[in-house]
Image (cartoon, rainbow, N blue to C red):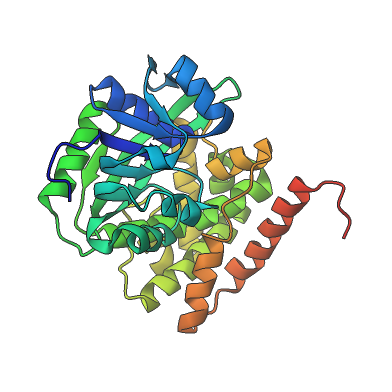
Amino acid sequence: MNQSRPEFEFAVLGAGALGSILGAHLARAGHSVAMLARGRRADHIRVAGLHISGLAEMVTPVTVITDPAQLRSAGTLIVAMKTPGTDAALERLRHVDLDVALSIQNGPMKNDLLAQVFGATRVFGALANTSGELLPTGEVLFTRNVNILLGELGGDLSTRAQQVARTIDAAGVRATAVANILSLEWSKFSAWVGMMVLSVTTRAVTWRYLSDPGSARVLVRLVREIGALMQALKIDLTDESVLPVATICRASEDEAVATLTRVGREFELTAPGHRMSSLQDFEAGRSLEIHETLGYALREAARRGVAMPQVDSFYHLVVALDRMKANPQHTA
C-alpha cells in the first residue's frame, strides 16, 4: 500500500473505447491519469488528447506511457485492454506500487490474473455496463453510461471501494460500489457469452438478435449453461445485469425467450445503434476475446463436471470465424 502520494491517481491499461472514456473523464475532473498505450494509438493520444463524443463531448490531454517500466506507482490501476495478452501485460507492471487494481474486461478470469500479480487483497472485482466505440479517426463514441460496479472479492462493502466508485462517478462515468460483485460479474458474463456469440454470428446490432425469437432462443440456452456453471461454483444468479439472468435461468424456455424479446424492444428504443465490442472487433479485423472467456468457462466446467454443449459448439464456431477472418486465403 502506498504510504505517500502516488505518481498518478489512476493508471489505465488499454486506450480503446472504455479505457479512453474513463481516462478522459477522470483527467477532465482534475485527477492525475496515465494512459498505458502503444503504437499509433499512443502517438495519437499524445498529440491530440482523448477525444470523446456522443454522451459526452470533450478533448482532454493526458499523460501517455508506452513503456510500463516507466510507471512507478498509482493509486488505482484500471485494466481496460482486450483480454488476449493480459497476463503478459500485467507481468510488466508487477513492479508498480499500487493501492488497488480492477479490471473492466469481459469474463471472470481477469480477477485471477490480477491476484496472481498484485495479490488478492489489492484486487477489486468490477464490471462495466458502459459502452463506446473507437472510431478510425481516433475519436471515441460514448454510447452507453449505465454503471460500473466494483467491490471487494471477499464480499465486503469497503470504504476504499466506495471511494474509488465515488471518484469515477463524480467524474461523469456512472459507478457504484457493491457487496455482491462476484455474483454480478458472473451474471454479466453469462449474458455476455450469449450476446457475444450472437453478435459475431448474426453481425447485427444488439436489439435485433435479442428481439428475434429464434436468435433469442439460442441466447437463452447459452445463458442457462453458464448459469449451471455458476450454480456449481456456488455463485448466486441475479437479474442485476444487462440481461435478467436469474429469470432466464429459472423460467421455462418459452418464458425466457419472451423476456429476451422484451429486452430487445427496450434496446431498440433506448440504444438502437448499440453493437457489442466483439462485433466491432470482428469487423475491424481484430482478434476476438474467445479463449480467455468462453474457453475459460469451458475449462472451469470441465473441472466440475458441468456439461455445456451449446457453449462448446459456439466456442469452436467463433474460433473458426476468427481464424477465417484473420486468414481469408488460408485453406488448410
Depicted 52 relative to depicted 170: above or below: above
* Location of residue 54 in the rendering, given as x and y in whole percent from the top left corner: 44, 21
* Location of residue 182 in the rendering, given as x and y in whole percent from the top left corner: 30, 61
Q: Nearer the viewer, residue 87 or 21?
A: 87
Q: Quadrant of residue 41?
A: top right
Q: Is residue 96 visible?
A: yes
* Location of residue 332 in the rendering, given as x and y in whole percent from the top left corner: 87, 60
Tell me what residue is drawn at x 30 percent, y 24 percent. 27
Apparent side of residue 70 relative to residue 168 in the rendered image (left or right): right
Q: Quadrant of residue 222?
A: bottom right
Tell me what residue is drawn at x 66 percent, y 36 percent. 284
Apparent side of residue 281 relative to residue 162 in the rendered image (left or right): right
* Location of residue 44 in the rendering, given as x and y in whole percent from the top left corner: 52, 21
Q: Nearer the viewer, residue 96 or 224?
A: 96
Total count of labels = 0
Q: Is residue 306 visible?
A: no
Tell me what residue is drawn at x 52 percent, y 34 percent. 38
Apparent side of residue 206 relative to residue 98 in the rendered image (left or right): right
Apparent side of residue 229 relative to residue 173 in the rendered image (left or right): right
Q: Nearer the viewer, residue 92 or 140?
A: 92
Tell me what residue is drawn at x 21 percent, y 37 percent. 6
Depicted 326 relative to depicted 5: above or below: below
